[in-house]
Amino acid sequence: MDRKLDLAPTRGTLPGEQVTTTHRYREPSGNVVAPLMGTRLHTATISLGIFTYLNIQPVYYGLLHQPNDNIKLVTGVPTRLNMALLSGEVDLSSVSGYAFAEYCNEFRLLPHLSISAPAAVESVLLFSRYENWRALDGKKVAVTNHSASAVNLLRVLCKHRYHIQPQFVTMPSDLDAMFATCDAALIIGDMALVEGHLRREIAGVGVPTIFDMGQEWAEWTGLPFVFGVWAARADRAEVIQSSGVLEALYRSKVEGLAHIDNIGQEQAPRLGLPPEVCAHYLRQMTYDLSAADLQGWRLFLELSLPNFQWKNIRWL
C-alpha cells in the first residue's frame, strides 16, 4: 500500500514566520513507520535515469564503478529525464523537485535521496547586466531549457521576494547568445559551475553580476532548496521494491560521499576545473532529503504550483 508523506505545517510559510516541522512516514491507518525498503530480490532489469551533471556523481559513484547487471543506466539533462520517467522510458530516475510535484500522481518518492543546497549551490546561477535585482523589472531574462525547478525558483524569487515582473524567454544554455537579446540569463549544471568559476567578460555586458539561486533562497527563507529528488513510476513500484535497486542506490551514495576527493579528481579534466573546486562544490550539497529539505521543498511548491496539495505526494 502507498505511504503518504506527512510533513507539518499544513500550509506554506513565508520568511519571518515561525514553524515547527515534523518529518515522519505515516500509514493510512495513522501508524508512524520507517520508510519501506525492498527485501526480496529478483532479476528484473530496472532502467535508472541519471542527470549528466557533476552534482549527482556522489549518489551514483558506487554504481558507476561497480556496474549492476540488473540496472540499465539512462543519461540526460533534468528536463529530458523528467519526460522519460513520465513516458515510461525509465522506471526510476532523479527528477527535478518541481516536475515530481507536477506529476506526483504518477510517481512515488524515494526516501533519503535528494540534491539539495543549504545555501550557495554554485551551479544554478543568474547572470545579470545589473547589480540590483529590481533593475530587471520589465526586462528580458533568458532561462535555461534544462530545468523546471531552477526556472520556477527564479519566478518565485522575482514575484515574492523582489516584486518584479521580468519577461522570461526560454533559450538553449549559451551565455553569449542569451545576452545578445536579453538582460540576464539563468543557466544550471556544469556549465553554470564553469561560467561562475571563470567570471568572464560577455560582449556588450562586461563581467556580469552573478546571483546564486541557492543562496538567494536560503537568505530569504532560512531553508534549504531541493533541486532534485528520486522518483519511481507508480506502476513499477512493486517491481522496484523487490529488485534490490533501492539498496544498491543507498550503498552507492554512501560510497560516493566517502570519495568526494576522488570524484573531484575524476571529473576535473572533463570540466576544465581544478579538482579542489569540484570537491568543494560537492561538499556544499546534501543528498539525504532531510526534514529541513522537505520543509523548504514544500514551501517552494506551494509558492510555485497553483492548487498544489502536499498530501498527494506518496513515498515508495
Image (cartoon, grey):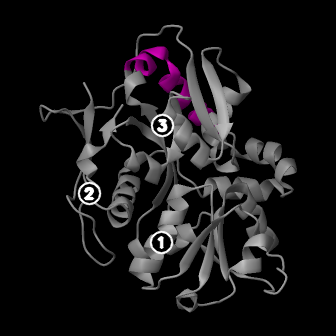
How dense is the environment of label 2, judged by Cα within 10 Å: few (below 14), some, or many (20 and up)? few
Report the front residue among 87 and 190. 87
Circle 2 residue: 21
Regarding mark 3 in the picture, which secondary structure is present there?
A: helix
Circle 1 residue: 155
Residue drawn 24% across the image and 72% down it:
18
Regarding mark 1 in the picture, which secondary structure is present there?
A: helix
- Give the numbered dot on residue 86: 3
Task: Please state the extent of the stretch shown in magenta in the rendering.
Answer: 238-256
Q: State yes or no: discs 1 and 3 in contact (Cβ < 8 Å).
A: no
Q: Amino acid at mark 1?
A: Arg
The quarter of the picture where residue 191 lies is bottom right
Badge 1 or badge 2: first in the primary sequence: 2
Report the front residue among 71 and 247. 71
243 in magenta? yes
Horizontally, is 137 left or right of 295 in the view? right
Residue drawn 69% across the image and 40% down it:
259
The reply to whether residue 127 is in sight is no
Residue drawn 81% across the image and 86% down it:
206
Q: Nearer the viewer, mark 3 or mark 2?
A: 3
Q: Amino acid at mark 3?
A: Leu
Q: Amino acid at mark 2?
A: Thr
